[in-house]
């Protein structure tokens, strides 16, 4: 069974930066789609960023210019770097993986809390 383990969350002051990591327990393929989503209290889970084959990326408007998603296929890991953090970035962040490595099913991590304080 595929496992995704997120790390790097915590409490950050507004204007600060963080780097989230998500490591897969299996070998991922370069064209697998990996992404970060987040869910704030009382809100639906929303896309933050995705990265696919050839490093093609997609970002939510709310994080464009402040977030960078990247991947290291050799380490089976996807990263999310965010700067200029705002209180509205507070949420549980989830990574996901879908592609050949998962049999084309979507696998989610357990989520990691990010809290941005004023």
Image: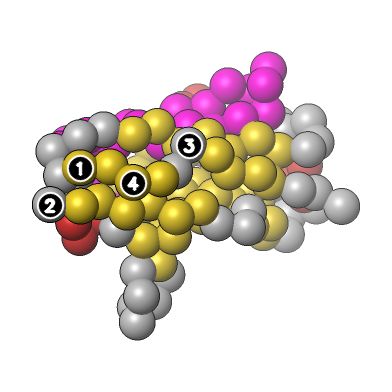
Query: Which residue bears the numbered disc 4?
Result: 11
Q: Alpha-carbon neighbours of circle 2 within 10 Å: few (<14), some, or many (≥20)? A: few
Measure how far apart labels 1 and 3 are at the Cα level.
15 Å
Q: Element at badge 3?
A: loop
Residue at 78 percent of width and 38 percent of height: 25
- Image coordinates for residue 17, horizontal then vertical, percent: 26, 33
Measure how far apart labels 4 and 2 are at the Cα level.
11 Å
Measure how far apart labels 1 and 4 are at the Cα level.
7 Å
Which stretch appears magenta? 60-84
- Image coordinates for residue 9, horizontal then vertical, percent: 44, 43
Name the residue nearer the viewer: 110 or 48: 110
Left or right: where 3 falls relative to 15: right
Q: Quadrant of residue 22?
A: top right
Measure how far apart labels 2 and 1 are at the Cα level.
6 Å
Residue 70 belongs to the span the image colors magenta: yes
Query: Which residue bears the numbered disc 3?
Result: 8
Q: Element at badge 2?
A: loop
Query: Which residue bears the numbered disc 2?
Result: 118
Query: In this rendering, is residue 13 above or below 116?
Result: above
Query: In this rendering, is residue 52 above or below 43?
Result: above
């Amino acid at each position: 069974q595929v496992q995704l383990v997120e790390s790097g969350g915590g409490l950050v002051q507004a204007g600060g930066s963080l780097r989230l990591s998500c490591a897969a327990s299996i070998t991922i393929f370069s064209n697998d789609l990996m992404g970060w989503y987040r869910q704030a209290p009382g809100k639906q889970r929303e896309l933050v960023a995705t990265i696919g084959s050839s490093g093609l990326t997609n970002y939510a408007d709310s994080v464009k210019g402040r977030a960078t998603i990247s991947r290291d296929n050799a380490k089976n890991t996807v990263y999310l770097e965010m700067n200029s953090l705002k209180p509205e970035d507070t949420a549980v962040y989830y990574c996901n993986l879908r592609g050949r490595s998962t049999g084309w099913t979507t696998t989610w991590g357990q989520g990691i809390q990010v809290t941005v304080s004023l």
